[in-house]
Amino acid sequence: MKFYRNSAEARAELGMAPGVDVSAVEAEYPFLTNDYYLRLIDPAAGTADPIYRQSFPAPEELADRSSSFDPLAENEQMPTPRLIHRFRDRVVLLTTGKCAMRCRFCFRKRTWKQGADFPDLTASELKRATEYLTAHPEIREVLVSGGDPLMLGKSRLREILTALAAVPSIEILRVGSRIPVVAPELLDEEYAALLGSFPGLWFATHFNHPRELTPEARAACTRLIRAGVPVVNQTVLLKGVNDDAGVLEELFRTLVSWKVKPHYLFHVDPVRGVRHFATGIASGLEILRAFRPRLSSLATPTFAIDLPEGGGKVALQPEYGRDGRYLDLHERKLIAYGEFNSPID
Ligand SMILES: *Cc1c(COP(=O)(O)O)cnc(C)c1O
């Protein structure tokens, strides 16, 4: 994999003319992409291209100086380094700061510049995390996150997963990775077999746009599924990238046909430097409303926001009910649900 760490150089590689100077943006939030993801950009579309917008710095990133770097208060909900415990039965483990490309809308943008301060999970941090898990048997699931845990490489990731799976109360490992989307060939048969060797392991990936649905990406998902790993997808609703019911319908339909379940559609988090990607919650609800009469429930993700102050995720739905009556599928009339709504004592 060839990495690009300078956006002017990457633009030149695509044959694009030099754009506005974003060197100040890059100094604040470093640029990183790779040859595979770069090639998904249509240079003729310029800065409006959905892949370009996800990966290239924009001057707007510096405009927002007031939002928090860590609105979800992740740093305050860490009982041991790298472990976020917000919900009773599940935790997040931050295993690395490395990624195969940097998403400009990243909700952990705060970790980008930490560089040496955000190295891979150490042996002693892993030990402390497993000790915490052992002391808290109510925790059943670990979200193995980062960065991108697949950037750790097979042997280190195997060590981490093995240590977590060895905690008796841990039943589920949920590995969150964008590798199938941004560097699918890295997820080879051997990687798929490694992940498939853990019985309760699920894989959560992150496709945002139909342009990312390449034969290579499909092959990576298929390797996982053949190895016995269920794959779900989380999409972030992004202004100017995918905030369109038609675009998302195509994305979700194709994912389901690949056996990848659209799990979540997230509104962008209120993180400093990503405000220009915010659509507003109403826009997500409108998209769900458009889906209701026309898109299979298998293809429809849960739309959710993650509350500031570590308040957690809230799933949102358009309002369909009023006084015991509910709007029909085509929104022509309200229909009473009837007396079955009043159970017999
Ligand atoms: C999102 C998240 C989870 C997982 O929540 P689900 O609704 O099960 O996907 C767990 N812990 C933290 C801190 C999270 O942000």
Image: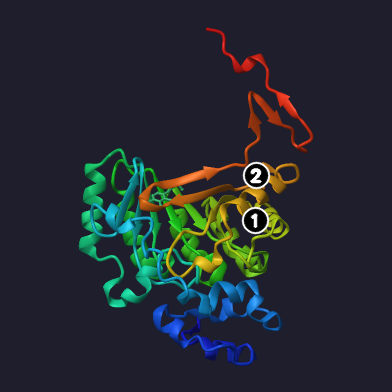
Q: How is the image coloured?
A: rainbow
- Asked if residue 246 is positioned above or below residue 12 in the image, the reply reads above
Viewer-closest of 166 and 147: 147
Q: Position of residue 339 (x, y in %)?
A: 65, 14
Amino acid on which the number 2 mark rests in the picture? Leu
Q: Which mark is residue 245?
A: none
Task: Confirm whether residue 101 shows in the render.
Answer: no
Residue at figure coordinates x 36%, y 61% from the top left: 70
**Residue receiving disc 2:** 298
**Residue receiving disc 1:** 255
Task: Confirm whether residue 138 shows in the render.
Answer: yes
Viewer-closest of 319 and 55: 319
Q: Is residue 112 left or right of residue 301?
A: left
Q: How many marks?
A: 2
Q: Position of residue 137 (x, y in %)?
A: 28, 39
Name the element at disc 2. Answer: helix
Label 1 Cα neighbours within 10 Å, binned few <14 / some 14-19 / many ≥20: many
Name the element at disc 1. Answer: helix
Q: Is residue 157 left or right of residue 256?
A: left
